[in-house]
Amino acid sequence: MRQTAGLVTDMLTLARLHAALDSVVEARQLIADIHDASPRPALEQVGALFDEARELLRTLLTTPKHRQAVGTSRS
């Protein structure tokens, strides 16, 4: 029973991470559209923060083995 509860928790966490990634991608596109209509330096900074958030979420969604490989290749 504990394994099942842990699996359900893991699946819920994955679903939340995917939902967060979708939201970040959508918000980033909105920021890009606003910036295209009216370029401002602050929007570039906000866009860069969304890019960082997107990459962090993508890293969390990779398998641990791949995540380690990605982490070492960036160093």
Image: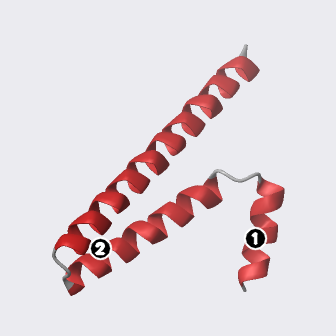
Within 10 Å of the Cα at label 2, are there few (<14), some (14-19), or many (20+) other Cα atoms?
A: some
**Quick check: 14 left or right of 36?**
right
Within 10 Å of the Cα at label 1, are there few (<14), some (14-19), or many (20+) other Cα atoms?
A: few
In the image shown, does 41 or 1 lie closer to the viewer?
41
Vertical side of 14 occupied by 45: above or below = below
- Colour pattern: secondary structure
Which residue is labeled 1 in the image? 70
Mark seen at residue 53: none
Which residue is labeled 2 in the image? 46
Residue sitting at 64 percent across and 60 percent down?
59
Residue 10 drawn at (x, y percent):
64, 33
Residue sitting at 19 percent across and 83 percent down?
40
Q: Circles 1 and 2: CB distance less than 8 Å?
A: no
Sequence-wise, the earlier of marks 1 and 2 is 2
Residue 15 drawn at (x, y percent):
54, 34
On the image, which quarter does residue 75 sit in?
bottom right
Q: Residue furthest front?
A: 37
| Quadrant in which the N terminus is drawn | top right
In the image shown, does 42 or 15 lie closer to the viewer?
42
Residue sitting at 27 percent across and 64 percent down?
33
Residue sitting at 23 percent across and 86 percent down?
41
Q: Name which residue type carries label 2.
A: Val
**Quick check: 24 left or right of 7?**
left
User: Tag 2's secondary structure?
Assistant: helix
Q: How many marks?
A: 2
Q: CA distance from mark 1 to mark 2?
A: 25 Å
Vertical side of 4 occupied by 42: above or below = below
**Quick check: 42 left or right of 72?**
left
On the image, which quarter does residue 42 sit in?
bottom left
Residue 8 drawn at (x, y percent):
63, 23
User: Tag 1's secondary structure?
Assistant: helix
Q: Residue furthest left?
A: 38
